[in-house]
Image (cartoon, coloured by chain):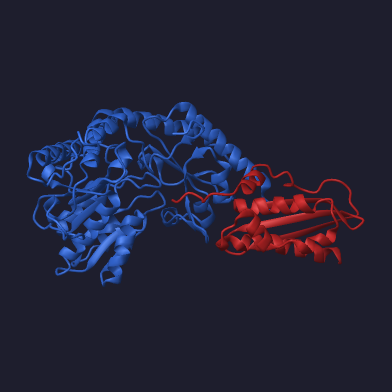
Chain colours: A blue, B red
Amino acid sequence: MNDHLIYLDYAATTPAAPEVIAAMQSCLGADGMFANPSSVHLAGRRSAAVVDRAREQLATLLQTRPDQLIFTSGATESDNLAIRGAAMARAGQGRHLVTMKTEHKAVTDSFRHLEKEGFEVTWLLPGSDGLLTMESLKSALRNDTQLVSIMHVNNETGVIQNIHSIGSLCRERGILFHTDAAQSVGKLGFDLDDLPVDLLSLTAHKFYGPQGVGALYIADRPGTAIFPILFGGGQERRIRPGTLPVHLICGIGAAAELAIAERSKNLERVTALRARLMSALEDVDGIMINGDPDVAYPGILNLSVDDVDGESLMLALEPLCVASGSACNSANVEPSHVLKALGRSDSESEAAVRFSFGRTTAKDEVDQAAALYRGAIDKLRGLAPAA
Amino acid sequence: MTAPESYNEEVRARFENPVHAGDIVGDYAQVITADVAESGYGARLVLCAGLNDGKIAALRFKVKGCPYLVAAAEAVCDSLEGGPADRLAGVSASELKDRLAVPIGRMGRMLLVEDAARELLESMGE
């Protein structure tokens, strides 16, 4: 990372850890484990052993069996495979699906495509704290509901949904439960053998692994079979065909092993960093925290004010690298659908900033971030005309 | 949450140091103000001129909006201050768009600047 940048966008992506890079390098080049793991010759079998080991490492992190993990290109593909694959596999039993408006676009867009194909989707809203209530979920479920998809940790606010209760309710009703756990795997503890989750999406680059590889957990229990969305080979039990990227899979395995060792320490660290930032900014006039921090992953802090332009705020914050509460494109500024669902106004959503902390975030970076944020808000308020 | 796109050097420089931002201070033969806003996006520009002998002795702005709007307001103030007031008629949204490499979808913000200049010009005759 450039020396001049202050990177507080670990919820977007994390740098591959040195241990991960070393593991991946062992797979590259003529002397590496580059062979196709589907090949039956010796080199292929050696690559297959690397893949098997990585699957075991990831299974250990999730506390589950390795044969329930399918490697994919990342959480977006895993979400698409889980949602579309489950909906199609169970379409003969019913076409009603349930999700939340605060899900990642990989989930919401998958459901929107299914709506166009004749599925009926119930879109649930959280409370202003970001949490889904069990009452609203219960009232959405029907006899023909086939799938519920609720993310674990929200990527914008960090709010943690109670996936144990949600999954239990789904099990009682015979409904498949999928969770997008891209923001929680490697950061929070998991015991998948004890969690009533049928399908779980994850990606390596959120926990110091490489970009381009992820996994889908599919519980080995009756009724969890899903249809593939790609065709062309027998890899990954025919659910996700395609030559396996050995170096990336080796990387996710190494990242999983590292996450087990680092998880508790990291949680303590980001909790302290978030408290430091909240304390430094609590007296900024009109500041709001998006999502209830008491029920959120502490590595994420999302703040809003309502009287500055979001795009100008992002530029004024440089060299601080944080995420904006809006999607800017050449045509317009689209306020965050997550913050809007929490009841924030357009201007509050557009001016939202997500700070996210990681293993290497230092206290003085948080202090600099706080100073930059204060300075940017003061500058933009100083430029603004009187109301 | 996509990051804002890249800005050219002039946008960055003028956004970073908008020396004409603020209110008109001092005595002038005439002080005129234009207040324009873009509905729906919350962008607003207030342009204020202090006139002496048909010249723009001081031109200041206040703005809430994207970096392109801030930079455009600053660029217009910078180029017109000290010159004849009728140069306000020459403020062109399309010229600002080209100069500041404004994406076509943000043309509305440049039109705000053009509208503010026209409004100032009309106020002079009142």
Tell which of B35 and B79 is nearer to you.
B79
Residue under the point 25% across and 28% down: A261
- Does A58 sit left or right of A123 as displayed? left
Tell which of A254 and A314 is nearer to you.
A254
Rendering coords of residue A353 (x, y %): 49, 45
- Does A74 sit left or right of B19 as displayed? left
Q: Count every numbered label the image shows and give the total.
A: 0
Vertical order, A86 against A261 (above or below): below
Instruction: Examine the image and state in which quarter residue A192 appears.
Output: top left
Rendering coords of residue A254 (x, y %): 23, 34
Quarter placement of the N terminus of chain A: top left
- Does A240 sit left or right of A342 as displayed? left
Q: Is residue A286 visible?
A: no
Rendering coords of residue A295 (x, y %): 35, 42
Tell which of A216 and A137 is nearer to you.
A216
Vertical order, B123 against B57 (above or below): below
Quarter placement of the C terminus of chain A: bottom right
Q: Residue furthest front?
A: A30
Residue under the point 63% across and 41% down: A378
Instruction: Examine the image and state in which quarter residue B116 appears.
Output: bottom right
Tell which of A205 and A197 is nearer to you.
A205
Residue under the point 53% across and 37% down: A319
Vertical order, A177 against A252 (above or below): below
Q: Is residue B51 visible?
A: yes
Instruction: Examine the image and state in which quarter residue B107 appears.
Output: bottom right
Residue under the point 18% across and 67% down: A143
